[in-house]
Image (cartoon, rainbow, N blue to C red):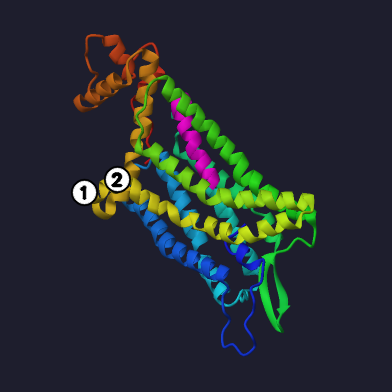
């Protein structure tokens, strides 16, 4: 599943014994270029995101904290890039031992599961804010979020356990040259190969993407039915992250399915097609750890001129408005006010420091969360912020 897997399952043509240094195949050169670009762009980029959240953001929304964990996961997996770069440059000769072979691929697998299930949490947070605002209000606490984040990390470490089990550092002799190769190893068992690739695709793609699609389909239907088309920066940011993950990881999971079909049918042509494609799609998936900071730059481009290096902090602070506008929208739809009217009344009340007194006092009080018949609404002027 990991970036180097594709480039090492097939040994390239080895140099002759008179060569002074091993040469890389065309496939290995492509992989080397992708990994180098991913490390150069992604590692400092993700560190910049972490720095921005800790040093530039005063009020951290749920989206902000989820993005922080995503950046930490991506930065940690990119630390394995130098190992893979050395591996490719050395003619696919693994010099770091069996433990390192298993560990770097295990951490890469953990990153995949952490990323997709953090995206699931983002989607569920949006779904709760729109469809069940009272429940969302009660759940948006530091304690709840910390438990959820811990659960995601524990789940990722558990789901990744098959990776080191099916990864070995083996000696291969080709052209009178002995190489140590870090490759998938299933003891020539079709059942083990089918299990690994099917398990990865089900738990790393089908289950989480089904949940994400369900949440966002419900959100879109709810907003369209209320004729509320405003999109916040938080929603756009999450949709960009989901789209990027799908673009980079879906090809890998498609190749997994193709290989499983080939194994079950015993078709060598299908297996060869999957084996050929795996090199490119695996390296492509690895680059997903580097692309998110680039997305944040595009999403926060409007803040760069004014905030400079602090633009990332401004972007993440702006995600707080998603919760506030969603709460106002939900209350206004229940009270009969239009979303625009609710937003105006809410803004005026915040600026004046007191309830807005309009012609229809009851309706404005309801919009502002001051309906005495529903004390629970009093706290919904803004969604609780995580400081």
**285 shown above or below 366:** below
The location of residue 318, given as percent across then percent down, is 32, 40
The question of residue 125 being in magenta is answered with yes
In-front residue for pair 137/107: 107
Tell me the quadrant of the picture where the C terminus can be found. Answer: top left
Q: Main secondary structure of the magenta part?
A: helix
At 62% from the left and 68% from the top, the residue drawn is 100
**Residue under numbered circle 2:** 314
Task: State which region is magenta.
Answer: 116-135
**Residue under numbered circle 1:** 306
> What mark, if any, has residue 123 been given in the picture?
none
User: Disc count in the image?
Assistant: 2
In-front residue for pair 158/79: 79
> Which element carries disc 2, helix, strand or loop?
helix
At 37% from the left and 57% from the top, the residue drawn is 48
Q: Residues within 10 Å of mark 2 (few under 14, many from 20)?
A: many
């Amino acid at each position: 599943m990991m970036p180097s897997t594709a480039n090492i399952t097939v040994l390239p043509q080895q140099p002759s014994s008179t060569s002074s240094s091993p040469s890389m195949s065309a496939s290995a050169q492509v992989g080397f270029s992708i990994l180098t670009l991913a490390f150069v762009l992604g590692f400092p980029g993700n560190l910049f995101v972490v720095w921005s959240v800790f040093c530039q953001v005063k009020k951290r929304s749920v989206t902000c904290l989820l993005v922080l964990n995503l950046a930490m996961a991506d930065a940690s997996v990119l630390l394995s890039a130098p190992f893979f770069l050395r591996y490719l440059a050395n003619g696919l000769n693994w010099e770091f031992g069996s433990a390192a072979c298993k560990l770097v691929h295990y951490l890469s697998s953990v990153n995949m599961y952490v990323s997709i299930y953090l995206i699931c949490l983002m989607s569920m947070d949006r779904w709760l804010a729109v469809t069940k605002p009272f429940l969302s209000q009660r759940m948006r606490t530091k304690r709840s979020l910390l438990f959820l984040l811990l659960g995601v990390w524990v789940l990722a470490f558990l789901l990744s356990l098959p990776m080191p089990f099916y990864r070995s550092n083996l000696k291969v002799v080709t052209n009178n040259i002995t190489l140590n190769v870090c490759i998938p190893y299933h003891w020539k068992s079709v059942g083990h190969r089918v299990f690994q690739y099917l398990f990865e695709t089900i738990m790393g793609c089908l289950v989480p993407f089904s949940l994400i699609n369900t949440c966002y389909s419900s959100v879109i239907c709810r907003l369209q039915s209320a004729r509320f088309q405003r999109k916040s920066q938080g929603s756009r940011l999450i949709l960009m992250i989901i789209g990027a993950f799908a673009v980079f990881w879906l090809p890998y999971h498609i190749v997994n399915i193709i290989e499983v079909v080939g194994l079950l049918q015993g078709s060598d042509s299908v297996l060869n097609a999957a084996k050929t494609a795996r090199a490119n799609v695996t390296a492509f998936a690895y680059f997903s750890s580097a692309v998110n900071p680039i997305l944040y730059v595009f999403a926060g481009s409007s803040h760069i001129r004014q905030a400079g290096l602090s633009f990332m902090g401004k972007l993440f602070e702006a995600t707080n408005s998603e919760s506030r506008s969603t709460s106002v929208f939900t209350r206004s739809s229940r009270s009969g006010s239009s979303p625009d009217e609710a937003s105006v009344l809410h803004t005026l009340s915040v600026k004046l420091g007191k309830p807005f007194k309009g012609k229809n006092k009851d309706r404005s009080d309801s919009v502002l969360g001051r309906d005495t018949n529903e004390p629970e609404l009093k706290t919904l002027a803004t969604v609780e912020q995580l400081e």
